[in-house]
Amino acid sequence: MKARVHVMLKDGVLDPQGEAVRHALGTLGFEGVGGVRQGKVIDLDLDATDRTAAEARVREMCEKLLANTVIERYDIEIV
Amino acid sequence: MKARVHVMLKDGVLDPQGEAVRHALGTLGFEGVGGVRQGKVIDLDLDATDRTAAEARVREMCEKLLANTVIERYDIEIV
């Protein structure tokens, strides 16, 4: 079973990477780009066979390691 | 219109970030995690109203800035 986790900075948190990308796009002549937010995507191969159990396990991984929940939010897709 | 871009290292390319995550998960007692690959996710707010044009524009951004197509692949979702 595969899981995909997105970890993004929470909405109020300054995102310098996203800002740098927005600025660079402007410099390259790409107009009409409003906000840009950059985050991480983590693809995991899991041994689990039960979808619900896998999601709970990945949630625990997010809380303990993958995301800093003070400033980041995450979402989990099991595929 | 919003676009989400995923940029991942191509399959043959060594992914030290993913390896570090896999190792750390093992250390924390999460078993049954096979491969881990880590990439970037970039959310863009676009002024565009035409879906096809927006996708073409974002593809150009990927080729020119967002991805290093020698070692990375990208996919684009328009939402």
Image: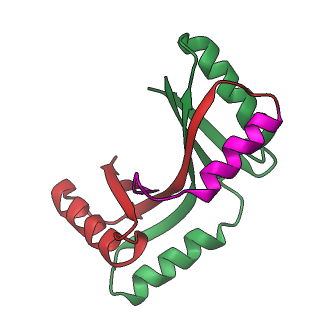
Chain colours: A green, B red
Q: Percent from the top left, x then y, of residue A10? A: 68, 51
Q: Residue at x 42, y 70 (%)?
A: B66
Q: Percent from the top left, x then y, of residue B3? A: 37, 55
Q: Residue at x 61, y 50 (%)?
A: B18
Q: Residue at x 49, y 22 (%)?
A: A1
Q: Magenta stretch: residue B36 in it?
A: no
Tell whether B26 sits left or right of A77. right
Q: Residue at x 64, y 49 (%)?
A: B19
Could you say which quadrant of the image residue B58 lies in? bottom left
Q: Magenta stretch: residue B24 in it?
A: yes
Residue B78, placed above or below residue A27: above
Tell whether B34 sits left or right of A28. right
- Between residue B69 and residue A74, name the one nearer to us: B69
Q: Percent from the top left, x then y, of residue A29? A: 33, 87
Residue B15, placed above or below residue A44: below
Could you say which quadrant of the image residue B9 lies in? bottom left
State the quadrant of the C terminus of chain A: top left
**Residue B76 seen by the camera:** yes
- Between residue A55 and residue B3, name the one nearer to us: A55
Tell whether B44 sits left or right of A69. left
Q: Percent from the top left, x then y, of residue B76? A: 32, 53
**Residue B1 seen by the camera:** no
Residue B29, placed above or below residue B71: above
The stretch of residues the image draws in magenta is B7-28
- Between residue B76 and residue B9, name the one nearer to us: B9
Could you say which quadrant of the image residue B67 lies in? bottom left
